[in-house]
Amino acid sequence: MHVEVRPPQQGPPTGKDVMIDVNSDNYLELAQVTAAIRGYMDKLPELRDVEDTRPLPGIEMDLVINREIASRFGANAQTIGTAVQLVTNGILVGKYRPDDSQDEIDIRVRYPSEARGLHALDNLRITTADGSMVPMSNFVTLKPAQQVNSIERVDAHRVYHVRANVKPGTNATAEINKIKQWLATQTFPSDVRVSFKGGSEQQEESGAFLLVAAGLALFLSAIVLLALFNSFYPHHADPGGGDPGDDRRPARHGRDAAAVLHHHDGYRIAGIGGHRGEPQHRADRYIPSIARQRDGSDRSSGPVERAASASVFLTTITASAVCCR
């Protein structure tokens, strides 16, 4: 008897520390590879609670029907199966629930105990369509085989699991790497596939996701820089803070012309109105938003600030995606 104690897990269940899936459509090769992996893991002193899902040793009898010969006698698989049930578990004919019980009881019909068993299959007779009794051994062959309690498939392929825990204080990743190095030296059949599941699979998926997220963040940052500066790196603004060109721009001639003059505390707009020969009058006023931008107070976001904000935004999105992952 083997007793295994497992502490309660926090978060999503991941199973044991080492989880290996072996799948193939060739049952014989599948069992051989699984046995080889189980034997190697049993030799590792850092592993404990090693198990696999191969069926326990046992024998079952398979009935191989020669359909061509059976059809000559007027027998089929259904009549053969019904006759075999009479010498095994019996034929279900109904159910009965006693008054003092809440569970139903099966009502089955079968031969007496002395007429049941494997020895009775050789003497079993089948009732054909014309009512005659024919020995089943004329067209049915008994073949012993490995007992199978359950069949598990993944992606339509038969699979066996090999699992193990590591001893306290042992690095599970190091033990998984040991098994991977040993598998690389083995020459298993090509139609047998071995893969690691559980925590190892989640680490590989997380690493691949981080690489994709980092590449996506760099690509989006490059797109932002190209959109703002037409370059992959931002150009610094003029240290003087002024616009390129002269401080005084030439005024346009004509009615309602205006000249923008540079002033020490802001931009002053001098409006020149009237026709030629008329007295000219000047209405000076300040534009507060431009004045604040010139002296540095309450400055609005420039291209560099927008690029920095975009980079921070992209970094935040990437970090949030990684945390959610």
Image: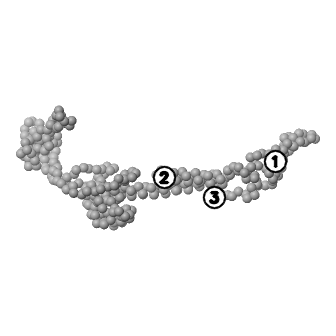
> If the image is split into quadrants, where does the N terminus sit?
bottom left
Assign a secondary structure to mark 2. Answer: helix
The Cα–Cα distance between marks 3 and 2, rounded to whole angstroms, is: 29 Å
Marks 3 and 1: in contact by CB < 8 Å? no
Amino acid type for the residue under numbered disc 2: Cys
Q: Position of residue 250 (x, y in %)?
A: 83, 49
Mark earlier in primary sequence (1, 3): 3
The residue at the point 13 percent across, 47 percent down is 140
The colour scheme is: one colour
Left or right: 171 in relation to 1: right
Query: Mark 3 and 2 residues: CB-CB less than 8 Å, in contact?
Result: no
Q: Which residue is depicted at the point 72% across and 51% down? A: 297
Question: Residue tagged by mark 1?
Answer: 268
Disc 3 residue type (three-letter): Tyr
State left or right for residue 125 relative to residue 20: left
Give the quadrant of residue 70. Answer: top left
**Residue 129 position (above or below residue 49):** above
Q: Is residue 183 visible?
A: no
- x, y (%) of residue 303? 67, 52
Left or right: 173 with respect to 30? right
Residue tagged 3: 233
Q: Which residue is mark 2?
A: 323
Using the rendered image of the protein, determine whether residue 200 is visible from the camera's viewpoint. yes
Task: Identify which residue, 166 or 249, lies in the foreground.
Answer: 166
Q: CA distance from mark 1 to mark 3?
A: 35 Å
State the residue in front, 152 or 297.
297
The picture quadrant where one finds residue 183 is bottom left
Write the residue at 8% across / 36% down: 131
- List x then y, in percent, for residue 325: 46, 52
- Dot 1 falls on a residue whose secondary structure is strand
Q: In the rendered image of this protein, does residue 189 appear above or below residue 87?
A: below
